[in-house]
Image (cartoon, rainbow, N blue to C red):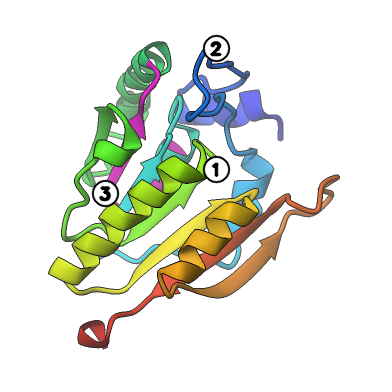
Amino acid sequence: MSAKKYDRQLGIRTVGLREWNGQDQYNRYEATPYEALERLFQSYRFGRNDRLVDFGCGRGRVTFYVHNRFQVPIVGIEAHDKTYEEALDNKSSYRLRARHIQAPIRLKYGLAEHYEVKPGENRFYFFNPFSHKVFKKVMANIVKSVETHPRTVEIILYYPLPEYKRILQGHSFQMINKIKVPGGQDFREKFLIYRFSPPAAG
C-alpha cells in the first residue's frame, strides 16, 4: 500500500520532505515509512499502561499510526513552526475518524531538549530528528526522570546513528531487539530497541 493510501485511511497528510535551512542541530522532516512501521509492530507492542513520546514528530505519521493501532496516550514534539501547524491540522482531521479512541494525543511545539519528561512516559521514539548533541541532552532528561520516578523505559531508534548508540550505552541502556526492514537498500534501515530497568523498577 502506498504512503498516500495509508495517509487517507488515517485522515492525515504526511508525505514529502522538508529541509530545515540554516539549522545544523535539527534535521529535515522525513516520515518513517509505513512499511517499516508495519514491520516494527509485527514484533513490538505497546501495552495499555504505556505512554509514548515521539521526538521530532514532524507531521505526525508515527504519532497517529501508533495511536490508531494501540490506542495509547502519545505526545508528539516538533520544533519547526510550519511542520507543527501541519501536525495540528492532521490531528484535527484524524480525530474526526478516531473519535472512539479515548487515549489523548498532545502535540507540543518547541525544542526537544526543553521537554520535561513526565513520570508516566516510558516509550520514546526517534528517527534521527536532531544531532547527537541534542540527543544527548534529551537522554539526560529521560534519565533524570527515571531517577526521580523509577520505571522501565524503552528507546526506539529508526535508522540509528552510531553516536546515538554510544550515548545510550553510556547511560547503561541495553539493546533488546534489532528489527531489519525488508527490502532496505541501506544497512541502517532498521529499528533498534533499547531498554533501561532501574533496580527499583524490578
Q: Nearer the viewer, mark 3 or mark 2?
A: 2
Q: Earlier in the sequence, mark 2 or mark 1?
A: 2
The range drawn in magenta is 64-80
The residue singled out by tag 1 in the image is 127
Total label count? 3
In depth, the one of 70 and 98 nearer the eye is 70
Q: Are marks 3 and 2 in contact (CB under 8 Å)?
A: no
Q: Is residue 183 left or right of residue 138?
A: right
Q: Nearer the viewer, mark 2 or mark 1?
A: 2
Which residue lies at the image location 24% right of the left edge and 82% below the top edge? 201
Disc 2: which residue: 21
Q: Is residue 99 left or right of residue 7?
A: left
Decide if residue 98 is on the left or right side of residue 104: right
Label 1 element class: loop
The amino acid on which the numbered mark 1 sits, given as a three-letter code, is: Phe
Percent x, y for residue 35?
68, 44
Judging depth in this view, the residue of 34 and 69 nearest the camera is 34
Examine the rendered structure and indicate whether residue 23 appears above or below residue 185. Answer: above
Quick check: 182 left or right of 14? right
Q: Amino acid at mark 3?
A: Pro
Please give the residue where the numbered disc 3 appears in the rendered image: 73
| Residue at 56%, 61% in the rendered image | 165
Q: Which quarter of the picture shows residue 81? A: top left
